[in-house]
Amino acid sequence: MRSVDEGLFSSQLFGGDTPDVGFFTWDIPENILYADGALADLFGIDPREAERGLPIETYLDRVHPDDRSQLAEAISDSIIAHMNQQETYRVLDATGRYVTVASFGRGFRDRDGLPRRYVGIVVPVNEVEAVSGRMS
């Protein structure tokens, strides 16, 4: 198997700069969302706490009040219908300002058909627009 030169890959795909994509995994029964540093920064949360896991409400509380219920409903609908979720909303970042992000997520069920995990990514919208502009 060939290894990919990360710098070359990033340069070709994103024009040199890799976007600040935040990754997360949510343990639904335990209500603990584990996130990387990029997601923590986007949501203005301590990266160490994010990595150790926090309730999803910690993240939803950082979503703009006008966007919060729509996002929560989209996540719920995605879990119930067992389908992908894509949503754009504003979130209070580490600098104390609202930034627009796009999230993409999907739930996974256990052998009994019960929702167990929800995984996804969150990307600043300007990064999504930059990437899609370069790829078209």
Image (cartoon, rainbow, N blue to C red):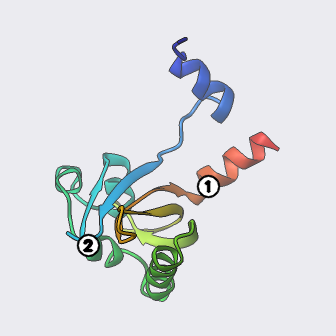
Q: Secondary structure at mark 2?
A: helix
State the image coordinates of residue 96 (x, y, percent, origin top left). Answer: 35, 67
Res 25 → quadrant:
bottom left
Residue at coordinates 47% horizontally, 45% vertically from top-left? 20
Seen as rendered, the residue at the extreme front is 112
Q: Mark 2, residues whose alpha carbon is within 10 Å: few (<14), some, or many (≥20)?
A: some
What's under tag 2, amino acid-wise?
A: Thr
Of residues 55 and 129, which is closer to you in this image? 55
User: What residue is drawn where x is 23% and y is 51%?
Assistant: 47
Q: Is residue 43 left or right of residue 4?
A: left
Q: Disc 1 vs disc 2: which is toward the camera?
A: 2
Q: Residue at x 46, y 74 (%)?
A: 79
Residue lying furthest top: 2
Report the residue at 51% width, 81% height from top.
77
How far apart marks 1 and 2 lie (CA) works out to 24 Å
Q: Which mark is residue 49?
A: none
Quadrant where the C terminus is found in the figure: top right
Marks 1 & 2, CB-CB < 8 Å contact: no
**Rendering quarter of residue 116:** bottom left
Q: 119 or 55, which is in the foreground?
A: 119
Q: Is residue 86 above or below residue 47?
A: below
Local SS, label 1: helix
Number of the label disc, if any, that sits on residue 58 = 2
Judge the density around disc 1: few (<14), some (14-19), many (≥20) Cα neighbours within 10 Å: few
- Could you tell me residue 57's position as x and y percent? 28, 77
User: Is 16 placed above or below 119 here?
Assistant: above
Residue topped by disc 1: 126
Indicate the amino acid at tag 1: Asn
Name the residue at the right extreme: 136
Q: Could you say where residue 39 lies in the image, as x and y percent from the top left?
A: 37, 54
Q: Quadrant of residue 94?
A: bottom left
